[in-house]
Image (spheres, rainbow, N blue to C red):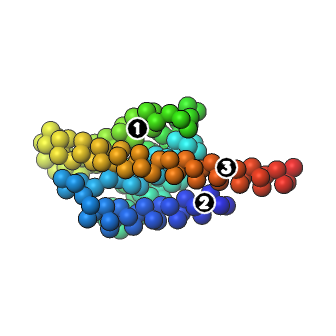
Amino acid sequence: MLRKVVLTISVLLLFMLQCTLFKVLSLASVSPNLLLIITFAAGFMRGKKEGMYVGLFCGLLLDLFFGKVIGFQALLYMYIGFINGIFNRVFYDEDVTLPIGLLCASDFIYNFVFYVFAFLIRNRLDFGYYLIHIILPEMLYTVIIMLIFYRPMLWANHKIEKSEKRSASKFD
């Protein structure tokens, strides 16, 4: 129960930060994707199921507030949470290279699918421009922000796991 409350508050807080503060702090007219970071972290640290739930919640928030079609980003974030949850088996606290690589891949997939469905279908074919001016800067900015948020997320995950183990041992 504590995990659900913490995740809900975290998602809402990161959603508000992404939509307000980080829009103002955008670099090269690109801002980091904080909801992608929490979706990635939930899937990577906790597994496929939790990654899917967090991804669905994050995507629905974006669809409800900014989307033209409800469900597109929810489905996309849900798949990203699921894919990152597959790598939960190789999750180690000390390793930072795998999370960086997975986040880069997640951000690239998110932006590529978004490009295909938002621009390519409308016959806007300049993928090179989109790659250089949108995808790569956002990927870099998101990874830098992830490096700042990753350790506090690990710490919170450990604290919640300890709390869950204590409460589970009370019932044994």
Does residue 73 appear left or right of residue 50 in this picture?
left
Q: Residue at x 19, y 56 (%)?
A: 29
x and y, in percent, of residue 168 in the image? 79, 52
Does residue 80 appear left or right of residue 45 in this picture?
left
Q: Amino acid at mark 3?
A: Glu
Q: Do the CB atoms of the residues marked 3 and 1 lie less than 8 Å apart?
A: no
Above or below, 144 against 9 in this view is above
Is residue 110 among the parts visible in the rendering?
A: no
* Label 3 crowd bin: few (<14), some (14–19), many (20+), radius 10 Å: some
From the image, tell me which residue sits under label 3: 161
x and y, in percent, of residue 76 in the image? 39, 49
* Cα distance between the residues tagged 3 and 1: 23 Å
Q: Amino acid at mark 2?
A: Lys
* Label 1 crowd bin: few (<14), some (14–19), many (20+), radius 10 Å: some
In the structure shown, which secondary structural element does the residue marked by tag 3 occupy? Answer: helix
x and y, in percent, of residue 68 in the image? 29, 63
Q: Residue at x 43, y 61 (%)?
A: 14
Q: Quadrant of the N terminus?
A: bottom right
In the structure shown, which secondary structural element does the residue marked by tag 1 occupy? Answer: helix
Does residue 7 appear left or right of residue 74 in this picture?
right
From the image, tell me which residue sits under label 1: 100
* Label 2 crowd bin: few (<14), some (14–19), many (20+), radius 10 Å: few
**Which badge, 3 or 1, comes first in the chain's sequence?**
1
Question: Which mark is nearer the camera, 2 or 1?
Answer: 1
Asked whether 18 or 114 is in front, the reply is: 18
Above or below, 124 against 105 in this view is below
Q: Amino acid at mark 1?
A: Ile
Q: Residue at x 48, y 61 (%)?
A: 11
Say which quarter of the image contains residue 17.
Answer: bottom left
From the image, tell me which residue sits under label 2: 4
Above or below, 43 against 67 in this view is above
Question: Which mark is nearer the camera, 2 or 3?
Answer: 3
